Image (cartoon, helix red, strand yellow):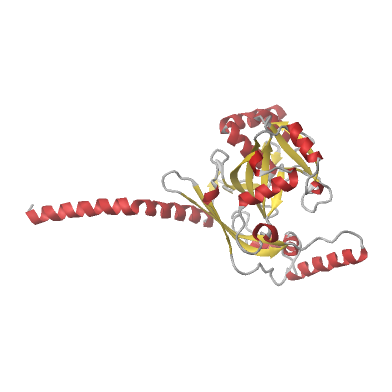
Amino acid sequence: MTGIDLVNGVVGAVFGMVFAVLFQQPLQNVWFRIRRRSATAVRSMTYRDDGVPHSMWSTFSIGPLHTSALVVEGDGEQAIAPESVRVRVLDGEVALPEEMAPWREEIAAEQEQAEATGTRVRVWNGPRYAVEGLEISRTALEEHPDVRLLLRPTDYYTFLAAQQLDRRLPDGSTPRGRYLDPDRPLDAPAFLQCSFGVNVAVVTADHLLVVSRRADQVRSGPGLWGSSVNEGLSRHIDSAGRHAPDLHDVARRGMREELSLQPHEYSLTLLAFVLDVERRQWSAHFTAHLTDLTGDGLRSRISHGVADRWEHQSFDHVPFRPADVVAHLLRPDRVRRWAPVTPALFHLALVHTHGRGAVERAEAQAVRRLR
């Protein structure tokens, strides 16, 4: 080897080390992002022992309790940091296809008629958001989630029209059959996803889980048992037309309006993003632990008045232990009366506090006792 060759080798090694130090981290970040986003665009299949393919996208269930909730991101053990969630509102309102547009006009006419005749209170056509997409990547070293939520403006009447997923179109098909593929649940047009909300599992200072029963007069899930707090995104309230909504702020608004709780009275943790595949409704799942307020204290607080009292007709308090919560979920009089995303919410909240092993053991034992 000549002296020139030796010098060239040393220079090359130095440049290689500098390149690795400067560019390794960015390249890792890009690779994780491409890997995860590509996975959502490819039909995800696995095979049973008998060789029959089935989708890996399974909805949440515990024994006889089956739901339409698909946990898209989050396992309960690892919290999703506020700074890891970026929300972007795209330009242009959602438009229904030509064959579904008359459904929205019908709803508007019905509401005007109801107000004119006094047969019922008119539903306000409030400004909402539709989900254009949810993009998920991972940080390179810790593999923490990095979430980008893409929204478009829409309104409540468009949401009601789009909820008629099984109504027949002029050609005899349905929106569900025409626009949705059950094997690719994340692929859906924004006009069929005109709902994004937050659900919070609230645990009191004396370790009681707050379980609510929705009022009979609400349009979505009347009479069903559900999360402690449920709040939908509002363009009017959460953005005021000037900025993208903050999901933690929406959860705090729900805590204030439904339970009269202020931010300094609890810790709030984002656990997951969940899709109700049957209704095409998205949710961010949170858990909130009250610092000082007990179950009795919360009952007293609610009795003094809450802003949205009409949304719930009753509350239960369940010991926040895996066996107790799972037994409550599987009660014969409750097992088919849960709002779709609630069992997954309570499961994730239990995992975050007690660990996956303890929760799964409790679920397995509860299912065995039912056999």
Residue found at the far bottom of this picture: 98
Residue found at the far left of this picture: 2
Q: Quadrant of the C terminus?
A: top right
Q: Is residue 332 left or right of residue 368?
A: right
Residue at 65 percent across and 44 percent down: it is: 263
- Residue 293's place in the image compared with 158, above or below, is above
Figure disc tally: 0
Residue 193, image x, y percentages: 66, 59
Residue at 32 percent across and 53 percent down: it is: 22
Q: Which quarter of the picture shows residue 226? A: top right
* Residue 289 in sight here: yes
Residue 4, image x, y percentages: 9, 56
Q: Which quarter of the picture shows residue 171? A: bottom right
Residue 165, image x, y percentages: 72, 59
Q: Is residue 219 left or right of residue 197?
A: right
Residue 198, image x, y percentages: 66, 49
* Residue 189 in sight here: no
- Residue 338's place in the image compared with 218, above or below, is above
- Residue 211's place in the image compared with 124, above or below, is above
Residue at 15 percent across and 56 percent down: it is: 8
- Residue 334's place in the image compared with 234, above or below, is above
Residue closer to the observer: 39 or 148? 148
